[in-house]
Amino acid sequence: MEISELLAQAANLMLTGMIGVFLFLSILIFAVKALSKFAATGQELEQPNVKKPSTKSTSAGVPAAHIAAISAAVSQFRQNN
């Protein structure tokens, strides 16, 4: 075989592979979108009841000194980086 025939065969194989991958990914995208729409129709989107945190404590069970130390470490890290 000559080099031109080999290059033509390589180009044909490359295009065939690229088209195959493109088609597969396109089908996959449409399938995922269709499944997400199908799954969303069966479920109602309701928001859960979330308890509002009390204003007394900043976090449940974590001492204020720990929160202050963490806040200081984060602010120092942000200043240095």
Image (spheres, helix red, strand yellow):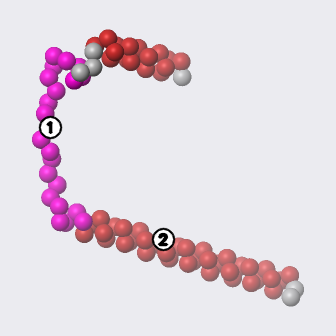
Q: Residue at x 15, y 47 (%)?
A: 47
Identify which amino acid the numbered label 1 is placed on.
Answer: Val
Task: Please state the horizontal and vertical placement of residue 50, each as a whole percent of the image.
Answer: 15, 37
Residue that numbered label 1 is attached to: 50
Q: Is residue 75 among the parts visible in the rendering?
A: no
Q: Main secondary structure of the magenta part?
A: loop
Horizontal placement of 3 versus 13: left or right? right
Disc 2 marks which residue? 25
Q: In this rendering, would 38 be left or right of 9?
A: left
User: Quadrant of the rendered structure where residue 56 is?
Assistant: top left
Highlighted range, magenta: 39-60
Q: Kindly identify the amino acid type of the residue bearing the numbered disc 2.
A: Leu
Task: Determine whether the residue tagged by mark 2 lies in a helix, strand or loop.
Answer: helix
Picture layout, residue 74 above or below residue 32: above
Q: Earlier in the sequence, mark 2 or mark 1?
A: 2
Membership of 58 in magenta stretch: yes
* Residue in the foreground of this view, choosing between 67 and 25: 67
Residue 72, image x and y in percent?
Answer: 41, 14
Residue neighbourhood size for the residue with mark 1, other residues' Cα within 10 Å, grouped as few (<14), some (14–19), many (≥20):
few
Residue lying farthest to the right in this orientation: 2
Residue 9, by quadrant, is bottom right
Give percent across and percent down for residue 4. 83, 83
